[in-house]
Amino acid sequence: MTIKPLADRVLIEAKEAETKTASGLIIPDTAKEKPQQGTVIAVGGGKKDEPMELKEGDTVLYGKYAGTEVNVDGRNYLIMRQSDVVAIIK
């Protein structure tokens, strides 16, 4: 199944949550934070007054509670508006 976002929406695959700290301590599931970084999988066509700036393959940062979680073919994705994306990581 393929997903094609509409208008100014993007489909993002979230980066996996960290399982260890920088010093090597294992983080339990209850203490893991929701990731705020991901990869753009698909983009919509944009709006007349707001062209699409994101493209497939971009690594982005987004708000902690942004987007709607969807599960397609056993994989978790987020669908959100382009305006919910805060930055592109280069």
Image (spheres, rainbow, N blue to C red):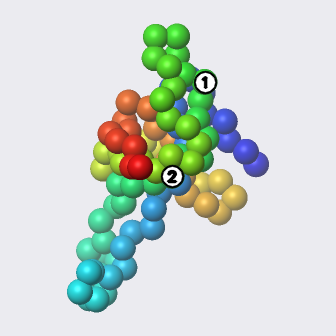
Dot 2: what SS? strand
**Farthest residue in the front direction?**
90
Give the residue type that dot 2 points to.
Thr
Q: In this view, does 55 lie to the left or right of 88?
A: right
> Residue 17 location in percent, x, y?
39, 69
Residue at mark 2 to residue at mark 1: CA–CA distance: 18 Å
Vertical placement of 38 versus 2: above or below? below
Q: Which residue is pictured at 46% across the width and 43% down the height?
A: 68
Residue 83 marker: none
Give the residue type that dot 1 points to.
Gly
Q: Which residue is pictured at 61% across the width and 60% down the height?
A: 75
Q: Which residue is pictured at 23% across the width and 86% down the height?
A: 23
Residue 5 is drawn in which quadrant?
A: top right
Q: In this view, does 4 lie to the left or right of 38?
A: right
Dot 1: what SS? loop
Q: Which residue is pictured at 30% across the width and 65% down the height?
A: 33
Residue 39 marker: 2
**Farthest residue in the right direction?**
1
Residue of label 1:
45
| Residue neighbourhood size for the residue with mark 2, other residues' Cα within 10 Å, grouped as few (<14), some (14–19), many (≥20) | many
Which numbered disc, 2 or 1, marks the residue that appears first in the sequence?
2
Q: Is residue 7 left or right of residue 15?
A: right
Residue 70 appears in the rendering: no
Vertical placement of 4 versus 12: above or below? above
> Residue 86 location in percent, x, y?
32, 39
> Residue 49 location in percent, x, y?
46, 10
